[in-house]
Amino acid sequence: MTKRLTQERIAALKRLETHLGVAFPSYELLHQALIHKSYANEQGLSGYHNERLEFLGDAVLALVISEYIYRCFPSAPEGELARLRSVVVSEHPLAEKARNLKLGDYLLVSRGEAQAGGRNLDSLLSDALEAVIGAMYLELDYETCRDFILRLLGDDVQDIWQSRDFIDPKSALQEKVQQYSADVPIYDVYHEQGPDHDKTFHVAVKWRGRILGRGQGKTKKDAEQDAARSALKFLAKGDGDI
């Protein structure tokens, strides 16, 4: 694979368009958005990877979500809006959206990165999704990006706002369970994935011997917050009563 698009790659990107729900006028930038730096280095494609598109897509994503929550919650203070946005566009939720879109199937990584499970790493998937948004912005327009992003994340914004778990999930979970007992939640790292420079931690949160939620993140703190957030969603359901 070089910078030149093969017919096989074009056919693959056309299949991806069906997952995205967006038609690109050409495939050069979409192709580049799905090239990890490791692949570019391995193939001698100096500078031809997705990092610059990721930079742009990150900014577009932040603007769309900022505008949306600003309009949706007119009485919310700036601090709450900032925390809500931070949760919505954090790495793990974006990676989950990327998995739903099958981005990993189209992501080009080096042989070593592929063997290490790179196509399923949160960091690579979330970066790829942001890069795709960057390509979409350049190839199409802001309104198309906005529609795409809100299809992906609009319902999540409303759900997270209603649950209020963007306000420090660990503290919120501790307050909830201590309505019933003085016992505090315990966070257990049960798995570590990836190389040392790009590790993902998997955490389970337990209370009185019962697993309430699981989460993951690039740091133990982020993984614990994600697990607490999962536990709050579980407990918000009828079948998750303590």
Image (cartoon, rainbow, N blue to C red):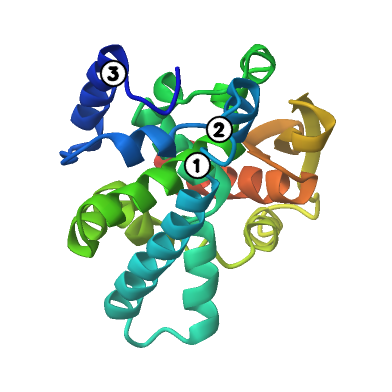
Q: Earlier in the sequence, mark 1 or mark 2?
A: 2
Determine which quarter of the picture holds residue 24: top left
Percent across and percent down for residue 17 are 22, 31
For the point 25% across and 21% down, which residue is it? Answer: 10
Check disc 1 and give the amino acid type.
Answer: Asn
Left or right: 47, with 186 as reference point: left
CA gap, disc 1 and disc 2: 6 Å
Q: Amino acid at mark 3?
A: Ala
CB under 8 Å between discs 1 and 2: yes
Do the residues under discs 3 and 1 have CB atoms within 8 angstroms? Answer: no
For marks 3 and 2, give the CA distance: 17 Å
Q: SS for tag 2? A: loop
Packing grade of label 2 (10 A; few <14, some 14-19, many >=20) is many
Residue visible at 19% across and 55% down in the picture:
144
Q: Are marks 3 and 2 in contact (CB under 8 Å)?
A: no
Q: Measuring 66% from the left and 59% from the top, which residue is drawn there?
A: 179
Using a 10 Å C-alpha cutoff, classify the residue at mark 3 as few (fewer than 14 neighbours), some (14 to 19) or many (20 or more).
some
In the depicted view, which residue is nearer to us: 74 or 195? Answer: 195
Pointer 1 residue? 50
Q: Quadrant of residue 163?
A: bottom left
Quick check: 46 left or right of 108?
right
Image coordinates for residue 209, horizontal then vertical, percent = 76, 31
Tell me how far mark 3 sits from mark 1, CA to CA: 18 Å
Question: Mark 3 = which residue?
Answer: 12
